[in-house]
Image (spheres, rainbow, N blue to C red):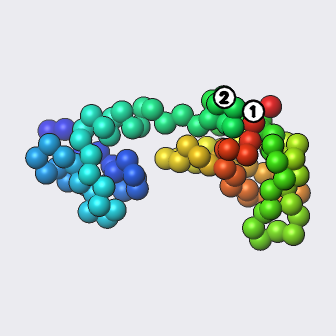
């Protein structure tokens, strides 16, 4: 018997097979076994220039950004060291700057240093 895959959209394990499709009752996502395997293998996090990013990389902010919950903006050229990738989300990374800790940033505003 094949292992029951987790949902590629929400990541929960509450899935079941319905004919050729796998269904997640929590989020309503439906996929085939081929789509689920291809979706997990294809996720690559890229910066604004299309360069692949990996955990532990250093990135630079390419434009001034307002930070929610802080009165200090993130200025262009700010270096974010030792980034962490967000599981299942190729558009966001986590990191810390010198003044602001616990940032979640969109990759479209970053370039690899």
Q: Quadrant of residue 47?
A: top right
**Quick one: 97 or 64, which is closer to the camera?**
64
Under tag 2, what secondary structure?
A: loop
Crowding at mark 1 (Cα within 10 Å: few <14, some 14-19, many 20+): many
| Residue under the point 68% across and 55% down | 104
**Quick one: 16 or 20, which is closer to the camera?**
20
Please report contact status of discs 2 and 1: CB closer than 8 Å, yes or no: yes
Under tag 1, what secondary structure?
A: strand
Q: CA distance from mark 2 to mark 1?
A: 7 Å
Q: In the orientation shown, which residue stands out farthest toward the top?
A: 51
Can you see residue 32?
yes
* Disc sitting over residue 51 in the figure: 2
Which of disc 1 and disc 2 is earlier in sequence?
A: 2
| Residue under the point 29% across and 61% down | 28
- Percent across and percent down for residue 106 are 66, 50
Q: Which residue is mark 1?
A: 112
């Amino acid at each position: 018997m094949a292992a029951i895959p987790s949902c590629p959209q929400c990541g929960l394990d509450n899935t079941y097979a319905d004919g050729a499709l796998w269904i997640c009752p929590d989020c309503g996502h439906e996929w085939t076994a081929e789509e689920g395997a291809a979706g997990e293998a294809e996720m690559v996090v890229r910066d604004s220039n299309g360069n692949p990013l990996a955990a532990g990389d250093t990135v630079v902010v390419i434009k001034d950004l307002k930070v929610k919950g802080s009165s200090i903006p993130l200025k262009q050229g700010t270096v974010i060291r030792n980034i962490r990738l967000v599981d299942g989300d190729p558009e966001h990374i986590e990191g810390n700057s010198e003044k602001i800790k616990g940032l979640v940033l969109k990759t479209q505003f970053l370039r690899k240093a």
